[in-house]
Image (spheres, helix red, strand yellow):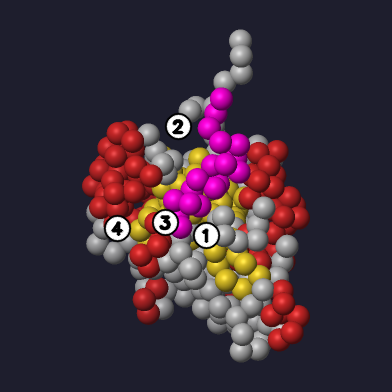
Amino acid sequence: MNQHQPLRIGTLVGGGDAVRVIPQIVKHGFESFSLTFWQTTGNTDLVETAKRVRELADEHGFIISTVGIFGNPLTGAGDNADTLASWERLIDHAHLFGADIVSGFTGRVPGSIDESLPRFAEVFGELARRAEDKGLRIAFENCDMGGNWNGGDWNIAHNPTAWERMFNAVPADNIGLEWEPCHQMVSLIDPIPQLRKWVDKVFHVHGKDATIAWDVVKEYGIHGPKDFVWHRTPGFGDTNWSDVITILRQAGYKGTIDIEGWHDPVYRDELEMTGQVHGLNYLKRCRGGDFIPNPQ
């Protein structure tokens, strides 16, 4: 990728599968990879994985944009028993991957978002300091994971009012958002004015869109038997990604957009990579295509 093109387009890959999967898909033109773990880094040897991934990065010219852990670090209950330790582990090892962002869910405690904030401040106040000491930023995905203001099991960072309270509770410059339009559209929030307002706190962008069936909303509402919204791969949803990229660039965003696949209701299963590569090429067009030098 040309050094004059700072906004790379990539995709998410499971951290434990990175060494196996990346060589199979990098040839399609992915320029970055966001490595993710679910609830725990498990028995993954992060040092060895990082070494092999960096060798692949040197060979193919991609970067690792983020390493992430998606679980509930605030309670540590059940399958989330290792989530907080995994946050610490990834913060300590992110530099080996060449990543400067560690991402994931905030977690939450039983009850409302307000009731989760003291524990959030305790846990992420310390994690933010740990990350800052290593020159890292922390980015929270804006996914509700089926929760709302009053209850949920995973994440409080899905609503702009919650963001205000989170960033007041932990007023650290190195904590921000792993933002995508999809999760806001599912709540019928318009993502474009939101991004314009919050862009300075957007550290990483997931390439995931949504299609809203407004005819269904108007006839049946959002609590009826009919689906009214679907997660989509970019290029198949409602968002104007040229606007998204324009807002990011106007704000000086130097990060990546990494496609979060495995959600599209049509381009899934045997069509998964067909959809993702379409999304990859679509987002490259939305950023203006390849870098072309001006005449001298």
Q: Position of residue 281 (x, y in %)?
A: 50, 45
First in sequence: mark 3 or mark 2? 2
Name the amino acid type tagged 2.
Met
Q: What is the magenta range?
A: 274-292
Residue drawn at (71%, 86%), measured in percent from left and top?
220
Q: Is residue 105 above or below residue 131?
A: below
**Foreground: disc 3 or disc 1:** 3
First in sequence: mark 3 or mark 1? 1
**Foreground: disc 1 or disc 2:** 1
* The one of 272 and 21 positioned closer to us in this rendering: 272
Q: Is residue 81 above or below residue 290?
A: below
Circle number at residue 233: 1
Instruction: Answer whether residue 87 is visible to the viewer in this image.
Output: no
| Marks 3 and 1 in Cβ contact (< 8 Å) | no
**Foreground: disc 3 or disc 2:** 3
Residue drawn at (38%, 44%), measured in percent from left and top?
28
Q: Residues within 10 Å of mark 2 (few under 14, many from 20)?
A: some
First in sequence: mark 1 or mark 2? 2
- CA–CA distance in space, label 4 to label 3: 23 Å
Name the amino acid type tagged 4.
Gly
